[in-house]
Image (spheres, helix red, strand yellow):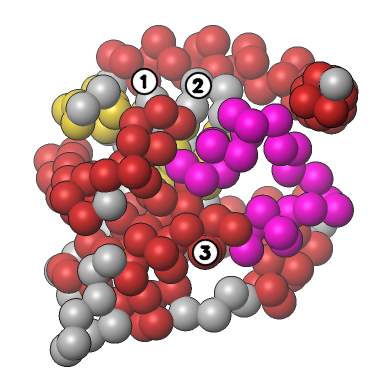
Amino acid sequence: MARALQKARFRLCYWPRWVLQVPFAAILVPASRRRVLGNYRGINICSGSFSSFSRIPGSEFLQRTLEALELVERFDARRFRRIQQEVQFIVHAELRSGADYRRPGRFCVVDFTRFDFAKDHDWYLRCYAAALVHEATHGALYSRYVGYTRRNRLRIERLCHSEELRFLKRLDTPDRYWSVQIAGVFNEQYYSQYYGANWFSRLRTIRQRISDVRRDA
């Protein structure tokens, strides 16, 4: 009975979003299938999304994404299976954050230009892999009918951060504690500010991000 009630609440919460998002997913999924650069154990890695303004070579995005997925699989099979289950497409687009999860179509959108592999390959590879773990955790919660609402979003982000941290701890060595350096302590203030911004502020941030990427390209 409790499970059925949870599903009903979840569907009631999400149906307005589905009405708006499903038509876009119906267009984007077939389009993304035509733009697949490669595949890793059922996960499609696609060339830059329609909103991408950078000049990142497709081969670079493919290679680094394959490396990140292989790293997760090698050190954390359970969390890699979660990525397999919850992510169908990994695509690049400019974002307000490093990555985002879109349930319709099971897209993991990554702002790949934020991961400067030329500057520090090992650091950004682990950052990228941790971001995939984080976004797949959002998908797993969605599959368990946990709605992402104003009331519980900080709890959800804290949980996703904890999963990042647990994954990165598997990569820690006596010489370098990746878990502390990359994930660190959950920053509640960041998420409060991120979600506290109004629609116009978010749009301005995206426009600035696109402008920065175009300038650096």
Q: Could you tell me if the residues under marks 1 and 3 are in contact, i.e. CB atoms within 8 Å?
A: no
Amino acid type of the residue that numbered disc 1 sits on in the rendered structure: Ser
Q: Secondary structure at mark 1?
A: helix
Q: Which mark is residue 162?
A: 3
Q: Is residue 17 left or right of residue 118?
A: right
Residue 61: image location, x then y, percent: 22, 45
Amino acid type of the residue that numbered disc 3 sits on in the rendered structure: Ser
Which residue is identified by label 2? 105
Residue 22: image location, x then y, percent: 64, 15
Residue 166 appears in which quarter of the rendering?
bottom left
Which residue is identified by label 1? 32
Residue at position x 29%, y 28% from top? 43
Name the N-terminal-most of marks 3 and 2: 2
Q: Is residue 118 above or below residue 44?
A: below
User: Considering the image in quadrants, where does the C terminus appear?
Assistant: bottom left
Q: CA distance from mark 3 to mark 2?
A: 25 Å
The verdict on residue 143 being magenta is yes
Q: Secondary structure at mark 2?
A: loop
